[in-house]
């Protein structure tokens, strides 16, 4: 063979080798309606990893792992809102999916802005099984403009069932909420149907009751319903630990079959409600007093950051391997149903204090989260930005039908109107007196209406006058902030309102997010000391009422005042910036200190006797709310210089150093002894927060007339009830040695 012929053959083979993949593959054609969506599924997983699923042609499906590369994962992670991929997985690492396998032999370069620009066999053309489903692990860093996605939820096959409900049985309890007993009805695209009770077990009932918001079920003993209707599901077999009925093994009735359930009827279940949802006043029971787990920072009942009790102190749970199975255990332990969502990355705000558990792996039937296999952690393993949270299924109570907002610009704001009995079995709408109305009462209103957190509570509603309702039906409302309905709060037995007129009725503004301020308790303990400060240096402090009353009788400018000084570091661990209620146009200028006060009172400092009597106090007007420092990756937004905006950004903190004026308690008149130091942030609830129970910090304090010692400084909700009682009954220190 001639050299030239040989060369031509080599060139032809090379070209054929280059073209071969393109002969076998094609560029993925765009979807017909352009509606392609992506999600991560499967478990166990974190929010930034999982089986990759694609929504195409009105149906969810998976991607086969054939020819899958890291470049493919980069493109898919960007679809999901992450900056890039760290890795990918094959062979259905996160469990096999269901439905279509939409893409196979996908080959991306890595820079494509859509998976449609990559080479593949085309939509729906695959020779794979779901045992070859591909997964991705994305870098936990979001692209600008993408909403935060830290949710692990049950992926329901819409083609199998859309919704489930209990249709109450006729009888004495018909019409009462919650519905605890009834016929199980399943909604499909063609309408509602029933489940045949053939082989129905108590484990199946446990799953249904969990979905309805109930922690447990009663034994199967009710007579089956003999409804004449379509039975879409012939039989169901659950383990009892599933979060959703669609995760159970099912046998569907044949298409177009009108045969009744052989030897039985429709499934009837009877559920046991948790303490918050029993009839009457039992809703007000405190779960935390009997449980070793609690939820913090959530806007609605049954949601929040997961915290567990170890010894006498509460701590959080790290989100490594956090999933629905573990979330189910938390929800049931607290008297709710199964988990609707398991959330990661401090979705309900960051906790403070210890992190107790990591890599929790529950089976689903444990009585307590502490019973689940888990790892204890060190500070290097997890940070509070990885705190786990849950959203639980709760029973439908219909609370929102007893209240409405009117006159607002959006559905999230307006004048509050209540539907209350008006005599003769008639109900009528009425107003709430605005006297004493705060953001704590607004929290309960927003919760009852299902509108999230409170942003503001208003005592006057002049500009929301759009209703003909004028009668005040409730006054003197005083809430703790954790009540489920406004009628659970304290209020006058007989309406008494100082100011008449609908314009003086209460109003609210609700929001999806809220701030949450907490004090760094250890720093107070570390920085405390006593200073005898000359009077001639305290003229400005006296002008701002930062000294005790006896200072007015002092021989100015001679003499001194004894001051208990310490630093305050106030963190915003919520999900919204903390901003003063009033805008800059309403701030007050103080000439002596030459600064603006954006809030009248930002912090109270109190020294209490052991029986709770106040012996000395101080206060801190927020002359400068700003971001002193922030966590890594968080930028400062607020700075007081040059009449700048004031506030504390999420993930930042404001430091009031011990040497700043008014950062003290004047203890000149206090005798030596044992006391309690108490610091309360945002004491008048002037600015709304997601949680007010952590706004107070208390310490045991010993003062010997010359020096001062603090110990056991802690936030108001960080100790168990027993430990808090021991703290309050503290008999006093016998010496200055702090153990």
Image (cartoon, grey):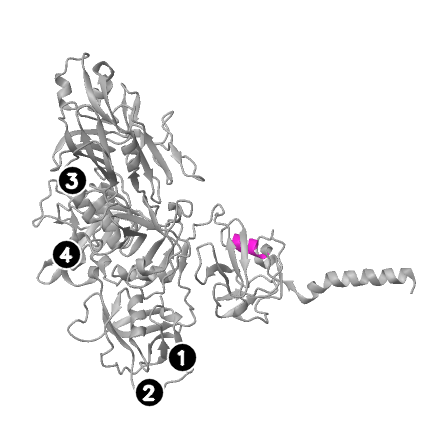
Above or below residue 72? Residue 547 is above
Instruction: Determine which of the numbered discs, if any, sits on residue 262 in the image.
Output: 2
Q: CA distance from mark 4 to mark 1?
A: 46 Å
The mark closer to the camera, 4 or 1, is 1
The mark closer to the camera, 2 or 4, is 2
Kind of element beneath mark 4: strand
Residue span colored magenta? 72-79
Residue hosting label 4: 420
Q: Is residue 297 left or right of residue 706?
A: right
Label 4 or label 3, whichever comes before in sequence order: 4
Q: In the depicted view, which residue is nearer to us: 17 or 121?
A: 17
The mark closer to the camera, 1 or 3, is 3
Question: Mark 2 and 1 residues: CB-CB less than 8 Å, in contact?
Answer: no
Instruction: Name the spot of residue 503 as percent of width and height, x first.
Output: 19, 42
Residue hosting label 3: 730
Q: Residues within 10 Å of mark 1 (few under 14, many from 20)?
A: some
Note whether residue 436 is visible: no
Residue hosting label 1: 252
Instruction: Name the spot of residue 511 as percent of width and height, x first.
Output: 32, 47
Residue 563 on the magenta span: no
Please tell me which residue is depicted at 59% across the width and 70% down the height of the picture.
126
Instruction: Name the spot of residue 437 as percent of width and height, x first.
Output: 18, 43
The quadrant in which residue 325 appears is bottom left
Label 1 or label 3, whichever comes before in sequence order: 1
């Amino acid at each position: 063979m001639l050299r030239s012929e040989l060369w031509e053959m080599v060139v032809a083979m090379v070209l054929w080798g280059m073209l071969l993949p393109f002969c076998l593959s094609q560029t993925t054609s765009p979807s017909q309606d352009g509606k392609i969506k992506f999600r991560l599924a499967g478990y166990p997983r974190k929010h930034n990893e999982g089986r990759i699923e694609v929504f195409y042609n009105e149906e969810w499906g998976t991607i086969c792992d054939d020819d899958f590369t890291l470049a493919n994962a980069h493109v898919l992670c960007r679809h999901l809102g992450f900056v890039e991929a760290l890795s990918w997985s094959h062979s259905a690492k996160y469990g096999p999916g269901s439905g279509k396998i939409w893409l196979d032999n996908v080959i991306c370069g890595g820079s494509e802005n859509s998976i449609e620009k990559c080479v593949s066999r085309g939509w729906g053309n695959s020779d794979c099984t779901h045992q070859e489903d591909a997964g991705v692990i994305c870098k936990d860093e979001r692209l600008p403009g993408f909403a935060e996605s830290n949710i692990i939820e049950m992926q329901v096959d819409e083609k199998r069932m859309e919704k489930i409900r209990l249709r109450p049985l006729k009888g004495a309890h018909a019409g009462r909420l919650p519905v605890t007993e009834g016929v199980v009805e399943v909604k499909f695209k063609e309408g509602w149907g029933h489940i045949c009770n053939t082989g129905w077990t108590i484990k199946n009932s446990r799953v249904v009751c969990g979905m309805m918001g109930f922690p447990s079920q009663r034994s199967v003993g009710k007579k089956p319903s003999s409804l004449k209707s379509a039975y879409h599901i012939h039989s169901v077999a659950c383990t009892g630990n599933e979060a959703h009925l669609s995760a159970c093994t099912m046998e569907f009735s044949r298409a177009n079959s009108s045969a009744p359930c052989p030897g039985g009827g429709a499934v009837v279940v009877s559920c046991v409600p948790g303490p918050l949802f029993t009839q009457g006043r039992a809703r007000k029971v405190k779960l935390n007093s009997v449980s070793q787990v609690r939820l913090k920072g959530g806007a609605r009942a049954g949601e929040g950051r997961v915290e567990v009790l170890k010894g006498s102190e509460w701590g959080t749970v790290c989100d490594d391997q956090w999933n629905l199975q573990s979330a189910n255990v938390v929800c049931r332990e607290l008297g709710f149903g199964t988990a609707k969502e398991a959330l990661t990355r401090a979705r309900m705000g960051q906790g403070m204090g210890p992190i107790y558990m990591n890599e929790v792996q529950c089976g689903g039937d444990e009585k307590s989260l502490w019973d689940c296999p888990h790892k204890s952690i060190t500070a290097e393993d997890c940070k509070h930005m990885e705190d786990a949270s849950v959203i639980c299924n709760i029973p439908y109570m219909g609370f929102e039908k007893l209240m409405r907002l009117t006159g607002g610009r959006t559905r999230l704001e307006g004048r509050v109107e209540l539907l209350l009995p008006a005599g003769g079995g008639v109900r009528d709408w009425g107003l709430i007196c605005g006297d004493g109305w705060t953001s704590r009462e607004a929290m309960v209103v927003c919760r009852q209406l299902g509108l999230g957190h409170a942003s503001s509570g208003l005592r006057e509603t002049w500009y929301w006058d759009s209703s003909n309702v004028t009668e005040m039906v409730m006054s003197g409302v005083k809430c703790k902030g954790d009540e489920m309905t406004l009628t659970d709060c304290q209020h006058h037995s007989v309406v008494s309102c100082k100011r008449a007129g609908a314009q003086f009725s209460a109003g609210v503004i609700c929001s999806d997010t809220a701030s949450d301020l907490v004090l760094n308790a250890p720093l107070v303990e570390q920085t405390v000391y006593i200073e005898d400060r000359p009077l001639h240096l305290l003229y400005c402090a006296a002008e701002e009422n930062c000294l005790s009353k006896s200072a007015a009788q002092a021989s100015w400018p001679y003499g001194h005042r004894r001051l208990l000084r310490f630093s305050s570091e106030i963190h915003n661990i919520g999900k919204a910036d903390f901003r003063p209620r009033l805008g800059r146009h309403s701030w007050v200028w103080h000439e002596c200190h030459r600064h603006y006060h954006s809030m009248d009172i930002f912090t109270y400092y109190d020294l209490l006797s052991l029986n709770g009597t106040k012996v000395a106090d101080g206060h801190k007007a927020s002359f400068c709310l700003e971001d002193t420092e922030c966590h890594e990756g968080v930028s400062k937004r607020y700075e007081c210089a040059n009449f700048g905006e004031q506030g504390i950004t999420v993930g930042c903190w404001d430091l009031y150093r011990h040497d700043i004026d008014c950062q003290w308690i004047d203890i000149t008149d206090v005798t030596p002894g044992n006391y309690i130091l108490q610091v309360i942030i945002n004491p008048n609830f002037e600015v709304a927060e997601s949680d007010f129970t952590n706004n107070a910090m208390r310490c045991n304090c010993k003062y010997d007339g010359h020096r001062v010692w603090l110990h056991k400084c802690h936030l108001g909700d960080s100790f168990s009830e027993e430990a808090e009682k021991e703290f309050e009954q503290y008999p006093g220190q016998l010496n200055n040695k702090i153990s």
